[in-house]
Structure formats: structure tokens, C-alpha cells
Amino acid sequence: MPVVASTLIKNNESFAGKILRLRGAITSGRKAAYLGLLLHAFRPVSLLIDSIIANLFLRCQVWPIEPMPSSLMIVSPPRAGSTLIYQVLTRVIPSVYYSNFHYLFPESASHFMNRFNLFGKTVNEYANYYGYSPELHDVNEGNALLNRILNRKEPQAIRGEFIRILGWMKASPDRPFLFKNVRHYGDIAALHEAIPELNFLRIHRNTEHIIRSELIGYRELGTFHPVPPELWNSQISDPIEFCVRQIQVIERTLDRQFELLPSSVKTEWEYEEFCKNPEPHIESLASENLHLNREQLRFDNLTVNLQPRSYPEEDFVAIREYLEEKL
């Protein structure tokens, strides 16, 4: 299992980390990676255009605070299959979701996507590149969305901003709001305090497979993502050991965060089990958390056979050695 990088970058938000990820995206040959680069390049201009559109045409539309439409946040460690599950859910569940188009035009994108019926539009495959999807109407990781919400700090302000975003998104009782994020795994309890109606879906995956997949990302991008702040100043130099520690810290934080949630707003899925039989998972989630019945679900869009990636057994030898040490 070769892992190649000249220097172990322990803060993926550092300048060096961003340069390495940029280089990896450019050389990847992946459509989703190139779209991601274009999104970042054009966002300063698109946000200005979006602000003009919103001020001239949209701000007069008042969003009612109650009743709040159902909403769902998907959380997991990196490389756990959460983007694929997010893509599946947005195709099967009639919903609004934070798309690449919303990343460019947060306040006006839903107007365009509704007009051209782009929410949940079926594509031939569930393709993504480290959380980046290849179409403008496809899902987005939502870092900008969560940053905007959590920058408000106080629970009442967070709640007010979230309700405002529901208005932009055009969420409704029969079209819940879905979004996903792996970076803000430590903010789940704070979100619940401010928005107790918000549902959370946690994705589990075989830990060895998560680590193996994250190491592939490190080899291709030169950094890990996300890196817990606890590890920014660590003295670990072995990428395999660092990755094991990274995933363990994130999983433990998710454990603690989920312990603080009432059972009524939290759901946990095994990635491998979902891929084998997604329909009952989706139907249960839609019924119990999103208040939708089976007749409203679009299972005819579930046309791609979902297969978890497999790896050679020898790839896991070093990973298991570190896991057995219980770092």
C-alpha cells in the first residue's frame, strides 16, 4: 500500500495544504474536480451577482417561521460514503438540497432549479471526487452553508439564519431540506440546541476501509481532510498512523455529539448495509423523520447498482497494527 508525499501536511487549511490539493485536482482528470476548481474561481463574482438579484427581486418575499419544513443533515467521517448516500437520497426523496449552483448563487439558485425542474434530476452514475460532484445541479459538500450558519454563534441567531436559508432553498412540508457535511462534525450538538427540529443521519463504514480510502486521498492530494485541530501540532510522521488517529478522533467526537441528541432526531446507517438494500433505509427515514410516505418517493430513479469498493487484504496489515494499539 504505497503512500507517497514529501511532507506530512497536518493542517489541510494551511497554504501548503491548499496548494497540494489544488495540484491534485488539476492532475486528476476528473470532471467533478475541474468543476470544483471553477466553482471556487467564479464564486466571488457569482456572489455579487446573487446579491444584486436577491436585493432587486427576492428580498420582498417573506418566509413564514412556522411550521418549519423537515430538514436533514448527513454527517460522517471522511471517505465513509456519505456523498454517495447524499446523491441517492436527493434523487429518490422529493427535496431541496444545497447544490453546486447554490454554492455560486445561494439566494437565487432554487428559483432557477425549480423553474427547470433540476432538483433530483437523474444522472447516469453517482460520481464524485472527494465530495465534489460533476454537475451544477448535483450536491455540494456545504462548507460555505455551515460556515454561514455557525458564524452566528448564539443559538437564536443560528436558528434565525437557518430559517432564512430554508426560505432561500424553497423548502416546504412536502419537500424537505437535505444537506451534508463532514467538516463540522463537532458542531452537531450546537446545531441541535439552536434547531431542535433538525434531523441528523450518521453514516458508519468499516473503519479499515475508511482509512484505506483516506490514504488514497492523501496519496493523490497530499493532505488529509478534515484534520482535527487536536492533531495540527502532532509529532506523528507516518501517514498511516496519522490517518488512523485522524479517523479515531473524528469518530469519538461524533460518538459524543450523538449521545447528546434525543433518539427522535438521530438515525444511524451502515454504509455497506445501505448499498445492499437502500429502499427500506430510505423509506424508514422518509416516514419517521421527513414525514413523507412511500408513494411520494421516486424509487424508479434508483437505477444504479450500489457496490462498496473492495481492497486487497494485504492493504490492511499496517492499518490493523495501528488500530490494535488503540491509539
Image (spheres, grey):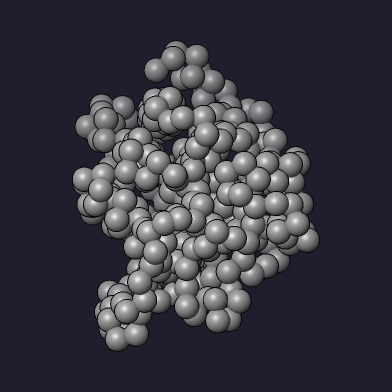
Q: Residue furthest bottom?
A: 56
User: What residue is drawn where x is 70% and y is 35%?
Assistant: 273
User: What residue is drawn where x is 57% and y is 44%?
Assistant: 289
Residue placed most toward the observer, 161 or 137: 161
Looking at the rendered image, the quarter that the N terminus falls into is top right
Q: Is residue 216 left or right of residue 93?
A: left
User: What residue is drawn where x is 49% and y is 19%?
Assistant: 323
Q: In the rendered image of this protein, does residue 213 appear above or below residue 107?
A: above
Q: Position of residue 316 (x, y in %)?
A: 58, 27
Q: Is residue 107 visible?
A: yes
Looking at the rendered image, the quarter that the C terminus falls into is top left
Q: Is residue 58 left or right of residue 279?
A: left
Q: Residue furthest top?
A: 325
Which of the 4 quarters of the picture holds residue 317?
Answer: top right
Q: Is residue 150 left or right of residue 118?
A: left
Q: Position of residue 291 (x, y in %)?
A: 61, 49
Residue placed most toward the observer, 235 or 167: 167
Q: Is residue 6 visible?
A: no
Q: Position of residue 83 (x, y in %)?
A: 54, 51
Q: Position of residue 189 (x, y in %)?
A: 35, 35
User: What residue is drawn where x is 56% and y is 35%?
Assistant: 267
Residue placed most toward the observer, 267 or 100: 267
Which of the 4 quarters of the picture holds residue 137?
Answer: bottom right
Which of the 4 quarters of the picture holds residue 43?
Answer: bottom left
